[in-house]
Image (cartoon, rainbow, N blue to C red):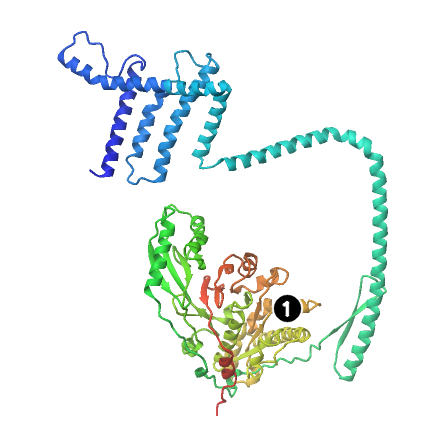
Amino acid sequence: MTKVQKKQIIGTILFILATIQIINFARLRVTVFPVFYLDFSNRSLLNLIIADLNWPFKFFNYLVYYLLGWAGLLTPFFFYLLGYTFFSKKETQRIKRKRVVLIWGLGELALLIYVVNYVSFIILPNSIQPGVVAHIFANYLKKIGGFAFISLFFIWSGITYYLFLNKSNWKILLKRFGKNFKRFFFMLTQIFSKLMQPNRRRRNSRQQQQLQKLKEEKRQLAYEKKQLKKENDQIKKNEEEKNGFQKAEVDLVDQSTVAEVSTEPDEDPHLKQAYIDVDFNTINIKEFDSRKLAFDFNFEALASTVKNEVNSEEFESLSKKIENTFSSQGIILNQSGMTIGPRLFRFEYDFPENIQLKEIEKFENELSYRLGGMKVNFEIPIAGTSKFGIYIGRDNPDTLGLKTYFNEIQNRQEKVPMLMGIAPDGQGYWCDATAFPHLLVGGTTGSGKSVFLNSIIINLIAVSSKIPVNILLIDPKHVEFTPYKKLSQLAHPIITESEDARKILIEAEQLMDTRYQRITQAGVRNIFEYNEQTEQEELTDIDIMPFLFIIIDEFADLVMQDKSGQIKKSIIRIAQKSRAVGIHVVIATQRPSADIIDGLIKANFPSRVAFKTSSKVDSRIVLDENGSESLLGKGDMIVKIPVDDKKRLQGIFVSIKEIKNVVHSKSIE
């Protein structure tokens, strides 16, 4: 006989006993007659046999009443519930807890009847007795400390029973009691202070008035000192600006440069501030058809992907640990698939029934602990499916190279094909750069941000022989874009100074307005229709409108150096209007603070690439949601483009040697 069958027999016996007791309570008095006991006038053999069979039940009923008293009225329900617990297939901690709750509750009820019966005979009649168990236990406690000790013990046991039911403890209960007591005490002090406040005001009103006058006099003196200091500083500043303006005017005249000088009234009508701006009639940004350049992209200069073998035992052990972690909390997972990416393992699971998403998210830290501190990321749900994924880093990731994926770049159907990264299934993730239309990149130092910008530039160079592309690079750090100094596709030499960046972005605004005039005169709506019409009419190369990609590294540093705020205004205006004329902006920053990446920037840069960030706050600034703070770094990124779902990708490493080999490619003979 198995354990399950034995437990079922015990449960059946408890059901029978409970049924017999209910019949007894319904027909006769429990204190006098047992169940099935009837007064037969003619005692036949059958009646004698029935009377003899009733003796075990009679003894059982009298025993229950004797031990528990009137609390025994609940024993049938107790036996039903207790018997139900024996029919469960698994002996879990929850079942054992239910049995303890039932037995404990029955004892508490018996003790309660004794306490109430002792306190007042009006509440309960004399015939209602607590039972021998409660009577003996209470008398023992009474000898120790009297009835007060019995009452305290009953209160303590009742509170302990309540904590056991709610799976709580005394520490939490005392904390709650302390908080409520503090609130009550605070309310009393507030009431008392309000009652005593009129008397205090009468006593201290004169002293308060004197102190208030002294404070006002001190504030007035301090304010007058500040005003005098501001006036002196403003006079000095005005003199310095006048001297500087005169020197700048002399230099401009010597260089024969046309400058617009405008004066606007300051807060003080006697002082005026001068502004010097660039000449809008002169644009230094070159426009040319990159398809006509004597430039041959050297695909052989790029590195190929080096794949490392994956140990099957590694991901099998990881899968078992994941399932064991969830099963320890009573959640059984059904693995529906697994993807081995270049950097990550992705384990795919169906959603368990009757489990909320928040409950699954709580396992992220627990699973990381079970895996020995490995970084674990949850994707809930996987985009386009009703499943969730668990990402775990590989011990031996693949080394990705552009050459493996650039072989198909010439055959892509996108208007400006852009390789963003490698998906978890090992396939390249391509998108149309014109659909961005502008891209915001954020991440900490060393997360792969600069390498990603290099891959974008190499991508644009690769398509420049098929699509007219011009590139404008702004590098406040002076060293990131140094290998591209001699690049043929540059529309302007690399910008490294904040003042030069301000001027070139103003020129980019003027170029945008000029392009809109050209499109309007041609009677078309965008750059695609304009170039198509130009090629059909076989006009000169000057009339071709190339795509212009403005790539800015360390945007936050650039904005902080620009005290005039013109750089940020120019970026916002270009981002708002330039899509139709083929001007696209890519900005990257390692410090995505809210004062730099504000609402206007985020609204006009709908495409986002987030590498590992230092906090959830930075992640919400870049992606408008959490997630990037738990990335693995070294090219691990989240890409969010309006035309597609959010993607988890791995960036491709581009070395300085590859960049130099591409930039110095041999010309076409």
Circle 1: is it few (<14), some (14-19), or many (20+) Cα within 10 Å?
Answer: some
Tell which of 231 and 250 is nearer to you.
231
Residue reaching furthest to the left: 45
Where does the image place residue 334, in percent across and percent down from the top left?
Answer: 33, 53
User: Is 327 situated above or below 620?
Assistant: above
Q: Is residue 521 visible?
A: no
Q: Quadrant of residue 426?
A: bottom left
Tell which of 169 and 432 is nearer to you.
169
Q: Residue at x 37, y 32 (%)?
A: 100
Tell me: 72 left or right of 613: left
User: Is 324 situated above or below 536?
Assistant: above
Tell me: 379 left or right of 59: right
Tell me: 209 left or right of 642: right
What amino acid type should be assigned to the residue bearing mark 1?
Asp
SS at mark 1?
helix
Where does the image place residue 167, in percent across and percent down from the top left?
Answer: 44, 37
User: Is 62 situated above or below 495?
Assistant: above
Residue reaching furthest to the front: 144
Where does the image place residue 337, in percent across and percent down from the top left?
Answer: 34, 59
Q: Quadrant of residue 285?
A: bottom right
Q: Residue at x 80, y 80 (%)?
A: 250
The count of marks equals 1
Q: Where does the N terminus fall, quadrant-wise?
A: top left
Where does the image place residue 106, in percent across and percent down from the top left?
Answer: 38, 25
Q: Is residue 263 visible?
A: yes
User: Is 11 situated above or below 619?
Assistant: above
Residue reaching furthest to the bottom: 669
Identify residue for label 1. Answer: 557
Tell me: 316 left or right of 447: left
